[in-house]
Amino acid sequence: MYLIALNPNGKKVVNLKAENLVLSLYLRPNTGVTAMRKIEMVDLKVQYQKIKPSIDCAIQEVVDSAAFINGLPVKEFAAELETYLHVKHVIPCANGTDALQIAMMALDLQPGDEVICPSFTYYATVEVIALLKLNPVFVDVNPYTFTIECPEIERAITPKTKAIVPVHLYGQTVEMEPLLALANSSSIPLIEDNAQGIGGNYIFPDGTEKKTGAMGTIGCTSFFPSKNLGCYGDGGAINTNDTETADKIRMIANHGQKERYYHELIGVNSRLDTIQAAILRVKLNHLDEYITARRQAADFYDEAFSNHPKITVPQRAVYGYHVFHQYTLIVQENRDGLVKYLQAYSIPAMIYYPIPCHQQQAFIGRGRVVGDMKNTMWLSDHVISLPMHTELDKEQLIYIAETVLNFFKD
Ligand SMILES: *Cc1c(COP(=O)(O)O)cnc(C)c1O
């Protein structure tokens, strides 16, 4: 099938669709035809090609060693991530959802205990709370930073509150200093959901910086392939500076045993595969450079869309370093029309997330909602995430930006 459309520059764009292949061609006057690389939401293929020799070698070493479970790269990666995050203990596990679950188990939370969390987040954050028969208490987010903040959290606290889960959503750092003060004064542990925030930091009023995930009682992250530090399958990690808590986390992630076949606790089986750890060791070396590439793409988008009356670009909180896991716009009108329009031009776009967690079917009759959730509801209807990854080139960015702007001109 041929799809011929005029892009905003008046250049013809030809989308050739055959099976799963979509090839977009620019027809440039005078210069002939060149192919633009297919735009992906996340381009892991091209990213892999650039580090292929080191990745292939790392995988081969694991296969040769046959130490598929708890091989040396798992310990090495944990130590390297400890250095990167400036934390005492990193405990790798099977995925980010397990990381959150194990963190809550390690804090000895009991059925009926309340856990304060955003509703505007990925479902896994709140799912584990309910799974452990804890009571999620949903608070609204700041409409510009997309994250939860102190006044609302304070309002949600009761004597039953046993944990707070701030989420560094889209790579935006939660405003941590007031939250740490609140957690401290009320003796409520913080579990940072750092699945989208790894590599980011928080700048304290006195100028000191700390990595996201490394400020709360426990930090949790995910190495799902599309995350900023992604492996080639599932993976996750839990970190803490408290040695006692770290020991408990290690035990819980390993069937509640310290010594093999002597089970002290009810735990789970949650491990990071050696192959994934070997891959992550290679990719951790590139994390900062990947974040720079994401921020450069974000800079380009910002420049294209700021001052547009119908588009709000993602705020970059002054107290943090945004790692742009997602680049999420707020559009005033016809968000769903924009998604379809972009699709027609072979540009993927995603809605993170269309239904707030407190309104998910599974949460009917569960949890407690604090306040009117006005921002959460509004954002769910108005956010759109554009392609964001480490391999976006200028041509693709121009094409995406022009197409978005053209939609609002039509
Ligand atoms: C991805 C993600 C998780 C879960 O991670 P998995 O590795 O997919 O289990 C949890 N919270 C947030 C905010 C996430 O983005």
Image: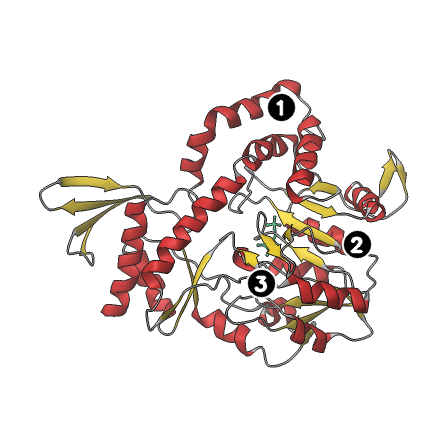
Which label's residue is closer to the chain start, 2 or 3? 2
Residue 294 coordinates in the image, percent (x, y):
45, 48
Which residue lies under the disc numbered 3? 121
Using the rendered view, name the quadrant where residue 122 is placed. Answer: bottom right
- Residue at far top of view: 64
Q: Amino acid at mark 3?
A: Thr
Q: Residue at x 15, y 56 (%)?
A: 10
> For this rendering, which residue is in front, 403 or 21?
403
Using the rendered view, name the quadrant where residue 391 is placed. Answer: top left
SS at mark 3 in the image: loop
Which residue lies under the disc numbered 1? 62
Which label's residue is closer to the chain start, 1 or 2? 1
**108 above or below 26?**
below
Which label's residue is closer to the chain start, 1 or 3? 1
Q: Residue at x 41, y 64 (%)?
A: 313
User: Tag 1: Cα neighbours inside 10 Å, few (<14), some, or many (≥20)?
Assistant: many
- Residue at far left of view: 30
Residue 71 coordinates in the image, percent (x, y):
70, 27
Q: Residue at x 45, y 40 (%)?
A: 44
Left or right, 232 with respect to 18, comes to right
Q: Are marks 1 and 2 in contact (CB under 8 Å)?
A: no
Q: Amino acid at mark 2?
A: Met
> For this rendering, which residue is in front, 338 or 244?
244
Q: State the count of labels.
A: 3
> For this rendering, which residue is in front, 346 or 328?
328
Residue 170 coordinates in the image, percent (x, y):
52, 57
Q: Which mark is residue 105?
A: 2
Which quadrant, please, contains the C terminus?
Answer: bottom left
**26 above or below 188?**
above
